[in-house]
Amino acid sequence: MISFAWPWLLVLLPLPFLIYLLPAKKSVKTSSALKMPTLIKISGQAVTPTKSNKLPIILLAACWILTVVALSRPQWLGEAIDIPTEGREMMIAVDLSGSMQIEDMQLNNSTVNRLTMLKVVLGNFIERRVGDRLGLILFGDDAYMQTPMTFDRKTVQQMLNESELGLVGRKTAIGDAIALAVKRFDQKKQSNKVLLLLTDGQNTAGKITPDQALELAVAKNITIYTVGIGAEVMIQQSLFGSRRVNPSSELDEQSLAKIAEETGGKYFRAKDSQGMSEIYNLLDKLEPIEQDQQQMRPLTALFYWPLSIAAVIASLAIFMMSFPRFIPFTNTGNSKSTIDSQSTNSYSTIGKR
């Protein structure tokens, strides 16, 4: 259907007609400077405008109507479309501490650091979250909200890709990250609140301990899935040769497992990109919260159609008034012949006398 965004502007349509009805200003009568002979009578047909004189007025009236209609912003409302509102409320907390630069992860048969692997694998995960509202928290010495809850998955993925090591410090504030997520979730009254926490160490900074943050999460009914990142074995080269070391010795798996278990979540150990794929299978099984169904109607602007037609008509009217010889506004030929014939008859009558 067609509707108008500003229908009140249509009251301007009769404005030219109202101006036309206003009483005309009385003009002062003046005598003619040229006196015509009484014998020469000009026919009334010579000064009577023909029907073609009304054409410019009709064109200008149509131009005015189309312009007012365009100003009223006509628009086409399409059929109602259901918007999918079922989805998860998921906050993603990513560790940017100094240990995330350790190159002990395998990605596409290459050795990369932990953050690089996380960006690739987590980026694919974010891309699959169609219909979910996602948020991104970056934590190091403190926790910062990088992206608030949004359906814009591309923005969340872009913010993740632009994150750099040491951006928020070199330490690990796990408690602050959980507390910040709890605070953001609290603004949403009804949702399946899920926090995905990815880290490779233990809590070494922050104002809130993991246990204190855990109590807040349990009280707000937030499910936390924790992911411990880091390989178990890494070959390290030194002056005395190579040796096998555990690059994840500082990973506090016991604390991460406790946080996940007490909130109804699960702890994962991501030793490589394949290990993180288990997160997908579990999170895909989460039941989304059912919300009120919403609808939208696509809106298409139509103002340019009457505006374009008005411009063409106005151009045509201006051309007709500027070059009247191409348009027979008055029947000048008949008038001239009438005057000439009457003049001839007058002179012939005088000659006979």
Image: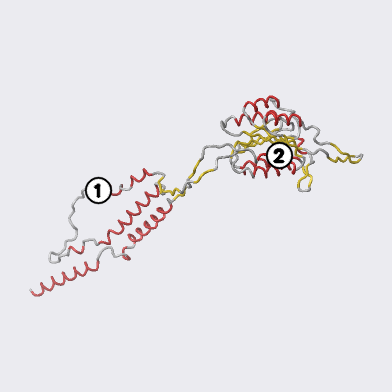
Please tell me how crowded label 2 is: few (under 14), some (14-19), or many (20+) other residues with Cα within 10 Å.
Answer: few
Closest to the observer, 353 or 239: 239
- Rendered view: 135 above or below 335: above
Please state, as top left, top right, bottom left or bottom right, where the C terminus lies in the image: bottom left
Q: Are marks 1 and 2 in contact (CB under 8 Å)?
A: no
Q: Amino acid at mark 2?
A: Glu
C-alpha separation, residue under disc 1 versus residue under disc 2:
74 Å
Q: Is residue 101 left or right of residue 337?
A: right
Is disc 1 placed on a helix, strand or loop?
helix
Closest to the observer, 183 or 171: 183
Q: Earlier in the sequence, mark 1 or mark 2?
A: 1
- Nearer the camera: disc 1 or disc 2: 2
Q: Is residue 244 left or right of residue 34?
A: right
- Rendered view: 58 above or below 214: below
- Rendered view: 318 above or below 159: below
Q: Amino acid at mark 1?
A: Leu
Q: Position of residue 161 (x, y in %)?
A: 68, 42
Q: Position of residue 235 (x, y in %)?
A: 85, 41
The part of the image, by quadrant, that contains residue 98 is top right
Give me the residue at 33% from left, 63% from top: 323
The part of the image, by quadrant, that contains residue 93 is top right
Give me the residue at 76% from left, 46% from top: 107
How many numbered dots are placed on residues in this image?
2
- Rendered view: 330 above or below 263: below
The residue indicated by pointer 2 is 164
Q: Position of residue 295 (x, y in %)?
A: 49, 43
Q: Is residue 21 left or right of residue 215?
A: left
The residue indicated by pointer 1 is 21
